Image: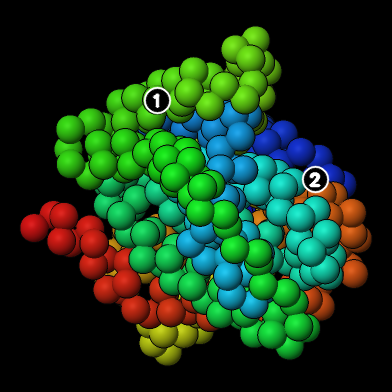
């Protein structure tokens, strides 16, 4: 009965579109009252979920992304991408994907990626003769890299939920899968571009190249500082995030100088708003997750999966399917915190490394960001492109299937994830 109350109230509240954080809190409290647990014990678990040093990196990563978004970094990365790969057919689509790869490595947010890159490239692609549905599909699908490529605050959330998995190993584990995703999306974009006869981009003037290179590389150094500091062991994840934020601040307001320093207060406002939502979700999920463990739900799920799974391959496929379905109705952060304690023991017993599972989990849930009805990246892209979601789903389907193929590859090819972390450890 207590499990029915916990999960049933959770599902009912979701159906009535109660915000996910409040849903988690209300379900936890209702179950606690039924079990006659002291209210402070649940609240202590919620507060305890925020008592982690590694979580201090999240505000800095969010702030760095907001600063670079405000300062025109997306436009400069678009120019750099255009210089690198804009000359082939459907070049602006390729530029879109490469720009998302660059920007995702700085912001760590798919929604920020769609907002910044999409607001520039979707109108530009429309002006050059690209169809609206194609422009939005390329933008939202490539934005998924924002949560896979380092630095990603979702990786830090997973590290916390998994009991302290190495953040540097998670960051490095996401590099090759992120690049594979980018390459795969470029292939499918090119195929569609050739089929629809989209144009090539105009060559860049030689006198513009030095400026494009210098400004683009300056922006990319934000990610280099953060990742390099962590991997080299010079900084912790939190210290690297703080130093990267200071660098982003200097580059944006004193080198690029596209916006006045006065605008920094708006950057802080957006950062605090995003941070409050993230921390509230972490706190609410911690209490909910503790009740799941208290009621032994993870072991029940594990026993059920093992009962219906004749081998590890079927187990991994079933876990991916469950996560894909959940990703259509839930946001990423609470799903990471809820799913990790349930599925991590199952996959580790089957021989999957926690770092490998973390990358698989994040990639899986990133697909949910472009899947209705709760796909936040899809909502933002549709709004920027001024197109209803149902009118672009047909065009989005090849990109969606490409991402699923990459997910399956990541799931069963462990070396793709573990190659770089193992080299660094050795």
Q: As drawn, which residue projects farthest toward the front?
A: 207
Mark toward the viewer: 2 or 1: 1
Q: Residues within 10 Å of mark 2 (few under 14, many from 20)?
A: some
Of residues 195 and 171, the one nearer the viewer is 195
Secondary structure found at label 2: helix
**Residue placed under numbered mark 1 in the picture:** 247
Instruction: Work out whether 2 lies above or below 407.
Output: above
In which image quadrant can residue 219 be found?
A: top left
Of residues 122 and 12, the one nearer the viewer is 122
Instruction: Work out whether 214 lies above or below 412.
Output: above
Residue shown at 46% from the left, 85% from the top? 314
Q: As drawn, which residue projects farthest toward the left?
A: 426
Residue shown at 68% from the left, 59% from the top? 140
Q: CA distance from mark 2 to mark 1?
A: 43 Å
**Residue placed under numbered mark 2 in the picture:** 13
Residue shown at 42% from the left, 40% from the top? 214
Residue 270 location (% of width, % of height): 66, 24
Asked whether the viewer can see residue 387, the reply is yes
């Amino acid at each position: 009965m207590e499990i029915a109350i916990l999960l049933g109230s959770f599902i009912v509240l979701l159906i009535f579109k109660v915000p996910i954080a409040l849903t988690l809190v209300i379900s936890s409290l209702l179950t606690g009252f039924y079990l006659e647990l002291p209210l402070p014990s649940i609240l202590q678990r919620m507060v305890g979920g925020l008592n982690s040093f590694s979580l201090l990196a999240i505000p800095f990563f969010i702030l760095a992304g907001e600063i670079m978004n405000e300062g025109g970094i997306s436009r400069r990365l678009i120019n750099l991408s255009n210089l690198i790969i804009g000359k082939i057919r459907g070049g602006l689509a390729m530029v879109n994907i490469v720009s998302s790869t660059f920007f995702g490595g700085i912001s760590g947010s798919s929604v920020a990626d769609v907002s910044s890159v999409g607001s520039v490239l979707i109108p530009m692609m429309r002006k050059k003769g690209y169809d609206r549905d194609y422009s939005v599909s390329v933008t939202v699908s490539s934005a998924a890299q924002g949560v896979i490529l380092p630095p990603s605050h979702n990786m830090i959330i997973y590290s916390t939920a998994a009991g302290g998995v190495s953040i540097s190993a998670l960051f490095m584990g996401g590099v090759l899968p992120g690049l594979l995703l980018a390459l795969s999306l470029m292939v499918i974009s090119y195929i569609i571009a050739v089929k629809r006869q989209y144009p090539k981009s105009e060559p860049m003037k030689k006198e513009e190249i030095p400026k494009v290179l210098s400004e683009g590389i300056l922006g990319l150094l934000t990610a280099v500082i953060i990742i390099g500091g962590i991997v080299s062991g010079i900084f912790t994840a939190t210290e690297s995030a703080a130093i990267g934020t200071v660098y982003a601040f200097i580059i944006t307001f004193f080198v690029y100088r596209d916006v006045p320093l006065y605008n920094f207060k708006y950057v802080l406002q957006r950062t605090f708003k995003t941070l409050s939502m993230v921390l509230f979700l972490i706190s609410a999920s911690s209490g909910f997750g503790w009740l799941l463990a208290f009621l032994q739900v993870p072991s029940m799920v594990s026993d059920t999966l093992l009962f219906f799974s004749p081998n590890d391959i079927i187990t991994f496929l079933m876990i991916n399917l469950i996560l894909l379905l959940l990703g259509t109705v839930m946001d990423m952060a609470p799903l990471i915190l809820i799913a990790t304690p349930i599925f991590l023991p199952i996959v580790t017993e089957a021989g999957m490394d926690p770092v490998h599972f973390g990358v698989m989990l994040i990639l899986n849930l990133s697909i949910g960001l472009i899947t209705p009805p709760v796909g936040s990246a899809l909502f933002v892209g549709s709004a920027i492109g001024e197109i209803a979601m149902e009118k672009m789903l047909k065009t989005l389907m090849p990109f969606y299937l490409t991402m699923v193929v990459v997910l399956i590859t990541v799931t069963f090819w462990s070396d793709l994830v573990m190659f770089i972390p193992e080299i660094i450890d050795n």
